Amino acid sequence: MHDTIPSRSGALAVAREQGRAIVAVLPYHYPRALLRAHRCHPIEVWGPPFEPGDLGALHFQAYTCGIVVKATSFLVREGFDRVDAVLVPHGCDALQGMGSVLGDFVAPTPPVLTFYPPRRARPADRAYLVEEIRALGRRLAEVSGHTPDEADWAEALAAEEAADAALADLYHRRGRLDVDDRRFYEVVRAREYLTAEDFTALAASLPEHDGAPDADGDVGLLLSGIVAEPLDLFDRLRAMGARVVADDLATGWRRVYPPSTLADPYERLADRLLAAPPDPTLGAPLDARAGLLVERLRASGARGLLIYDVTFCEPELFAVPVLRERVTAAGFGVLHVEHELGTTLPNQTLTRIEAFVETLR
Amino acid sequence: MTVAALGIDAGSTTCKAVAVDADGHSVGWRLESALPRVEAQTDALLVALALELGAADGVPVVATGYGRKLVRAATRDVTEITCHARGVFADLGTGGTLVDIGGQDAKVIRIDERGRPVDFAMNDKCAAGTGRFLEYTADRLHVPLDDLGPRSLAAPRAEHISSTCTVFAESEIVSLIAQGADVDEILLGLHRSLVSRIVAMVRGVGLTPPLLLSGGVARNDAIRELLGRETGQPVRLPSAPQLMGAYGAALLALELTR
């Protein structure tokens, strides 16, 4: 097993050595193989959590989520100097606002690209998405100076789909893995910035238990939300006698895209994005999402759903009342907590979570 | 009288310890204002109570409250949600919906027929809806804490305080004073404001009767009266509302011996 996981800066240096253009990508659905085929490498920007929000706060209302505010601060302070382009998928209104602010007002040297995934999966949405991916490809070709040929596409699709399969396999093997939750999510989140081949090797290196895993009577939780920061959360959960047995995180299971058999690369990428697990930023019906969460709670042995949201995360917060109602009706406990990105875990938040775990024993 | 277990509630405003016998009956307690050094204070409090009651060494101790992780003598620590539920259930012999208003947070806990918390809500991000809200505004109006309830209930009408935020409420108080408003009517408005916040939390969790009230603020008659009026439910208080966390902790400590 890899003892240390390369940092984002380390991954950026590796990609540069490979002659790839660096694209800073905001959360969180985008056609990754498209970037690779165009000799670009995505480094996702999820804050960073401990970045001061001062420069971003100049552009946004006080009720804008910390990911957008801090990411804007980071890009303005140093990020723009380190990348060749910025890609802002329209995951929510805050991200859409960020794309506009960066492109129209900050106007940095690296181009700001936007990407709008449709909110439904009707034939018209599919056709639109294929065109949107083609349009993004043309912009990427301008960034890297490379237009992919058939061999580029074959290589890019094979590498990225292998990495996606490795991510899916991590979830499949989860119960057998001999790593704690913190390590599991450190590896899962490395998909945000490692090259496909490095991620695939890292994921495959996680060891499995020799015998049956020892759960120690821990309370199993299904963790939902956008991003589980800080990672100390997992240490604290363990100390409370709880563990995460499944997740519905935007930085995790929501990006386990199913494979596609379509031959055309643009259609194949669109097909996979549209088949993503139910996700509020892709307009998935709440009913389908709630139903699947209940199924996954049952299948994973989780006793409760912990919804751990970044403060002011609008697409997540809209869903909470319905999820709470449906999951509670199915006999599972639900706790919703909001966390200010970039702060240490407040004692009050930990007390709520600990009390929740106690109610599930 | 033999002490079988101890519970300690290291709260944000007060520190409480309760001793129980083998039947789970309270046999002694101590309460003092919270000090910044939680470790030293809880050590001293437990020693004092044990000496007073002649408790043997090695009696199990469960700690609760915001400082629970810092209690060196604790055999185990348990959150105040579980401890309050357990304490109130044992004291009143019923589950229901418990409102606990402490110094720095307010909790609404739904307790099942076995005394277990099954759902809860906490207001812990600011002083709104907590004892601190009343303490702060009482100080601003130069009214002793113990007079808050009686004076509020004696007011013929309430001034309207729209904010549940302590800081914004103070701005409203300053404006009302400047307009010559009666202090008691301001006080009644403040109590209504706090209760409206609590009732919103009760509705969030869902009110399963009976409605129970604990925590230091339960000593305030106006809160109890207004809570009953707003919810349409009679409010029941345990015998020692401020000690329920520590009492519940002691009962959980007692379970460790079985």
Image (tube, coloured by chain):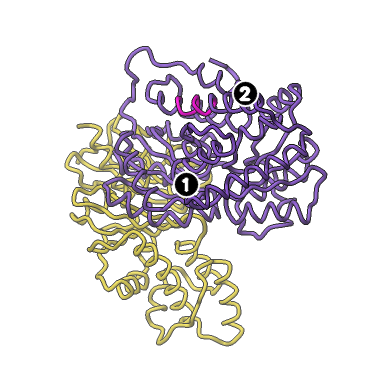
Q: Identify the residue position indicated by label 1 in the image.
A: A279
In the rendered image of this protein, which colour is used for chain B? Answer: yellow
Between A41 and A250, which is closer to the camera in this rendering?
A41
In the picture of the structure, the residue carrying the numbered disc 2 is: A155
Q: Is residue B125 magenta?
A: no
For the colour purple, the matching chain is A
Q: Nearest the camera: B34 or B121?
A: B121
Left or right of residue A268, residue A68 in this image: right
Kindly report which numbered mark, 1 or 2, lies closer to the viewer in this rendering. 2
Q: Residue at x 59, y 38 (%)?
A: A266
Vertical order, B101 against A118 (above or below): below
- Name the amino acid type tagged 2: Glu
Q: Amino acid at mark 1?
A: Asp
Q: Where is residue A262 shown, x and y percent of the image? A: 51, 34
- Please identify the residue farthest to the top as the structure is shown: A210
Whichever of callouts 1 and 2 sits on the residue coming sooner in the sequence is 2
Q: Secondary structure at mark 2?
A: helix
